[in-house]
Amino acid sequence: MLSEEALILLAAFAALGFLILGVLNLIWPARARHPVRRRTPAAPRAARPHRQGALARHAKDRGRPYVRPQPLAPSSVPLAPLAPALVTPLATADIVEATAPAQPIAAEPSETELAPSTLETVPASLEAALPSPAESVPLEVPELPSEDESVVEDCFALYQEQRYADVIDRAADALTAGPDGRPLTDPQAKAALWSVVALARQALGEDTGARAALENAIAAAPDDDRPTYQRQLASLAESVAQGLLAEAKRHASPDSEDCLGMIRSAVAWLDRGAAAVSTDTKLAELAAGAQALLWPAWQRTVMALAQRQEFRAARRLLREALSDPRFPASRAEAFNELFSGTFSGEIGQLTAQAIRSMQEARESDALASLQRAETLLDTLNAEALPPSRRQEVDRRLWWGYNKLGTRRVEAGEHEAALEPLFHALGYDVGPARRQETVALLVRALDGVADARALAVRELADSGDREAALVQCDKLWAQLRSANDMGLAQTELAATFAKVQRLFESLGRRQP
């Protein structure tokens, strides 16, 4: 066991050894095993190129919005004069070695105020290398796009991404409210935006909407920019018209209204394009070719409608063609013939319906069909139907009314037969047909007289002489009306004699 004095002696020797090592380290300091690497200065960023025009930048991806860099303010701490011992110039390598930090640079160094002693140790060569505020070159700041220009850029970028619905929505917001709550006011930006909307509409197949957008662009554009959008409208019209004409040529039914509608739409598009750019010779030639296709297609369609007995639709198309100021005079005769043919055809259709109704014992339907045909004929003026067509229509109507009257006379319905027979008597169908109707009327009136005579005798036998006389007066007036409508007195002589005998039986002279 060591004594207490021995332990104290050992501790004193150890402390003395540590003291000697510390003094030696101060006199001859040892090198660090891992020397600190100096931070390589970052390479300066390349200057951002100047922004181009709005439409030229639509194809590029847009980065983050540009922030204008603020110029560096000069230091508020004045530099102290250098000490005489430090005026000796130093090489550039020595300056870098002297100014290199001895410790690693922190990620975010804090701002510290330099001490005066530190400022006094700055070499003179470093002070000469620092640019003075008067000699510093200002930074070149790229031109920032305006709000209107950025809206056009956004919409065109959406268009290139094929987000056509987003283009329309974004443009609608800009044109009505704008980014700052106000609509666009710059005419050039508005016209460009409408042009992009037209492209989106065309990509969606909305050709009419694209045309309306381009017309808005033309209306909003300045005078110098207006020809650009007019050419765009002419190009759109040419493209759409060529597509319509090609589709009409491939149509399965060239005599249909759909095919005619395609050609008419193509002509309308070409008219719009020619109005926008009147000097476009290619567009004018295409319009002339479409006009040459239009009128033959129109005539084919009307003839097909007439064959399908769609007479009202055929007359509608004929009226539209004849009222067109560009309707060729060489086709006027053919179209007028078709127009009159639709009337005679419809009247023939109605008379055929009347015949079928009579065969099916639906005489009321037959009479209604004949009356509609007669009303249709009354709406025509003398020039609408040529004489040959008029005679044909009259014969059809006469035949229908005469046939209905014949059926009723043969069925013993003499009173009901009078109305259709009197209608038949009003048509100029020649002496032979007229005499046929007259004979039927005489039979019908004679049958009416026989029926009324029986009623008159019954009233007289019952003692109601006044009522019997009233019936005789009605029968006499009916005969006189037939006489006025064309029946001769000699043709009704037998019937008049029957009525006279009725008056004599009642003790009254004939009227």
Image (cartoon, helix red, strand yellow):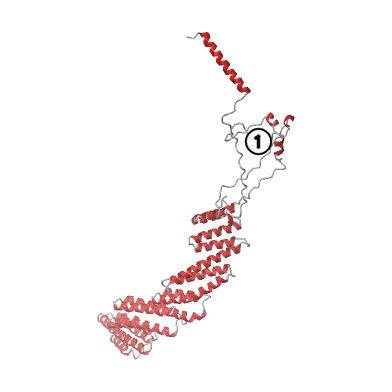
Q: Quadrant of residue 390?
A: bottom left
Image x and y of residue 297, in percent: 46, 75
Q: Amino acid at mark 1?
A: Val
Lateral position of residue 12 relative to residue 254, left or right: right
- Please give the count of numbered marks on the rendered protein: 1
Q: Quadrant of residue 408?
A: bottom left
Image x and y of residue 331, in percent: 49, 80
Q: Which residue is mark 1?
A: 96
Lateral position of residue 465 relative to residue 92, left or right: left
Q: Nearer the viewer, residue 137 or 457?
A: 137
Location of residue 322 with respect to 476 vertically, above or below: above
Location of residue 264 with respect to 408 vertically, above or below: above
Location of residue 359 with respect to 142 vertically, above or below: below
Lateral position of residue 207 relative to residue 222, left or right: left
Residue furthest to the right in view is 84
Q: Nearer the viewer, residue 349 or 438?
A: 349
Q: Is residue 421 visible?
A: no
Q: Nearer the viewer, residue 293 or 16?
A: 16
Image x and y of residue 170, in percent: 52, 54
Looking at the figure, which quarter contains the C terminus?
bottom left
Secondary structure, mark 1, is helix
Image x and y of residue 106, in percent: 58, 34
Q: Nearer the viewer, residue 224 or 55?
A: 55
Density class for disc 1 (Cα within 10 Å; few <14, some 14-19, many ≥20) is: few
Residue furthest to the bottom in view is 490
Q: Quadrant of residue 444?
A: bottom left
Location of residue 94 with respect to 305 vertically, above or below: above
Q: Is residue 60 visible?
A: yes
